[in-house]
Image (spheres, grey):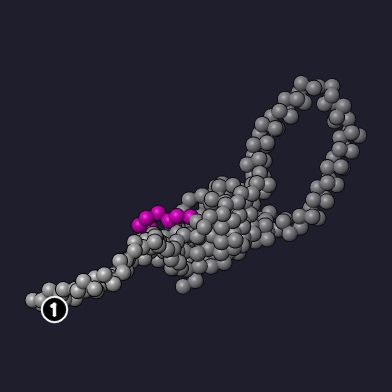
Amino acid sequence: MQLFGDLERFAATVFYPLRFVLAAIAIAGVVVLVVVAVRRGWLAAARRHPGRAGILTAVALVVLAPAAWYLGSPLLIRTELIEPPPAALIASPDPITPEPSATPGRTPVASASAIASTPVPSAPSSPPPSPTPAATPIVRSGAFSGADDFHFGRGRATLTEAADGALTLRFDDFSVRNGPDLYVYLSPDPAGYADGVIELGRLRATDGSFNTPIPPGTDATGARSVVIWCREFAVLFAVASLDG
């Protein structure tokens, strides 16, 4: 599939900036082709042999339609996912009540009047302290940029660490060009995909703010960028260089 990836990159960098001009040329080409087909009698020949024309049309649809849908449908399909950012829960410690001190060898005795005048403490009405969310420390972050005009990418990637040491990759205000077989990688190269990347699984959505968990035990100390990569055709879609 490397050949298809090279063709796709070539089309994205050369043809996409000229898409409106090429669209006009394509429409004009279709009109010319129809006129030529009518004048040369191709349409009349197809009507004279409907069975043969039908077989050729069916074969073309069976071969071309699935490929066109697989390659072209991501341009029309968008997915959105909104999730809260990861947070570590730290329980507030209970207040420590000091015990009354007493003189060794002597038992304090309260008088009857003191006992009568001492108010009896009422039961606490407030509920016990509940765990309060604490901000998760940020490890590294960076802004997304697309590989070219066609493969756009924007938003921010943040590598966070929870209190228990678990790592999570956070996407904020994220958006990327959809494509077939998009995966998320941590790369040792700030510029994008390189040998030694860590695969984090399929991209969960093309738009939104969401989390991508990192497998336990993953050593992300060497990660220098977050990469959105088409695994099927080996094409870079977007990259975010991580600071720090």
Question: Toward which corner of the image does residue 216 lie, by quadrant?
Answer: bottom left
> Label 1: which residue?
103
Please give the range of residues in magenta.
Answer: 212-219
Is residue 125 rendered magenta in the image?
Answer: no
**Residue at position x 46%, y 60% in the image:** 86
Q: Residue at x 54, y 50 (%)?
A: 204
The front one of 201 and 109 is 109
Dot 1 falls on a residue whose secondary structure is: loop
The overriding secondary structure of the stretch rendered in magenta is loop
Q: Is residue 195 visible?
A: no
Measured from the top left, where is residue 187 in percent x and y?
A: 47, 61
Vertical relation: 216 (above or below) 30 = below
Residue in view at x 56 percent, y 54 percent? 82
| Residue under the image location 82 percent in, 26 percent down | 46
Q: Is residue 71 visible?
A: yes
Most distant residue in the bottom direction: 103
Foreground pick, 156 / 84: 84
Q: Hey, what amino acid is under mark 1?
A: Thr
